[in-house]
Amino acid sequence: MLNRAYDIGVKDTVFDPEMPNSDNPFNVYYKKPKSHEKPLFRVRISLTGKDVPFIKRVKYELHETFSDPVKIVERSFDNPDCGIVIWTWGKFQIEVTAEDHDGNFVVLYHYLSYDDEIREQRKKRSISADSPAKQVTFVDMTRGRS
């Protein structure tokens, strides 16, 4: 991305109002695998910023313990923020390489922070909650779909 400072960042979230059958945008989806004790959380990682429309594709480099640690996403009408969904039990730094339509690249680093988000939303909701639908709810997807 030559001679231009792009307004692009990376965010992660466990709150996904577009999750099927979600009537509560503060649902946190998780699975309990038999292979280890820690639950796996459904985390969506995506780009933010006013210059995201200039991005053509994004390469996410996840932790080396993932079976497929490199994810490449083309920006599309259905995925305008180049988002991916992962199931993870831990936090780690990801390397994100964004390519613009002219073939220029920008590399960003992001440390997952979804547990901070859960803690922050719980605090906000406990103070101002006026209905159960606004509570942070943990939804077990162990037998469900991703």
Image (spheres, grey):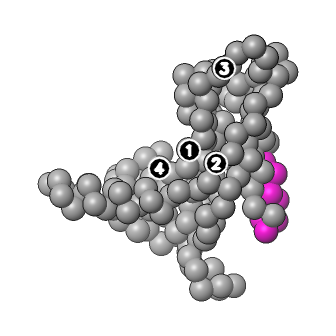
| Mark 3 surroundings within 10 Å by alpha-carbon count, few (fewer than 14), some (14 through 19), many (20 or more) | few
User: For the residues marked 3 and 1, what is the alpha-carbon distance in whole angstroms?
Assistant: 19 Å
Mark 2 or mark 4: name the one nearer the start of the chain.
4
Secondary structure of residue under mark 1 = strand
- The residue at which mark 1 appears reads as 11
**Numbered disc in front, either 4 or 3:** 3
Give the alpha-carbon distance from disc 4 to disc 3, as whole Å: 29 Å
- Mark number displayed over residue 16: 4
In the image, residue 16 sits, relative to residue 39, either above or below, namely above
The x and y percentages for residue 18 are 47, 45
Mark 1 near mark 2, Cβ–Cβ under 8 Å? Answer: yes
- Tell me the crowding category of disc 4: few under 14, some 14 to 19, or many 20 or more residues within 10 angstroms, Cα based: some
On the image, which quarter does residue 89 sit in? bottom right
Is 117 above or below relative to 55?
A: below
Measuring 48% from the left and 72% from the top, which residue is drawn there?
A: 140
Compared across the picture, whether 79 is left or right of 26 comes to right
Q: Amino acid at mark 3?
A: Ala
Q: CA distance from mark 1 to mark 4?
A: 13 Å
Residue denoted by label 2: 110
Residue 122, position as x, y percentages in the image: 31, 62
> Tag 2: residue type?
His
Kindly report which numbered mark, 1 or 2, lies closer to the viewer in this rendering: 2
Q: Which image quarter is the C terminus in?
A: bottom right
C-alpha distance separating marks 2 and 3: 18 Å
Q: Amino acid at mark 1?
A: Lys
Q: Nearer the viewer, residue 114 or 139?
A: 114
Magenta segment = 65-71
Disc 4 or 3, which lies upstream in sequence?
3
Prevailing SS of the magenta stretch: loop
With respect to residue 8, does 27 lie above or below?
A: below
Left or right: where 79 falls relative to 58: left
Q: Which mark is residue 5?
A: 3
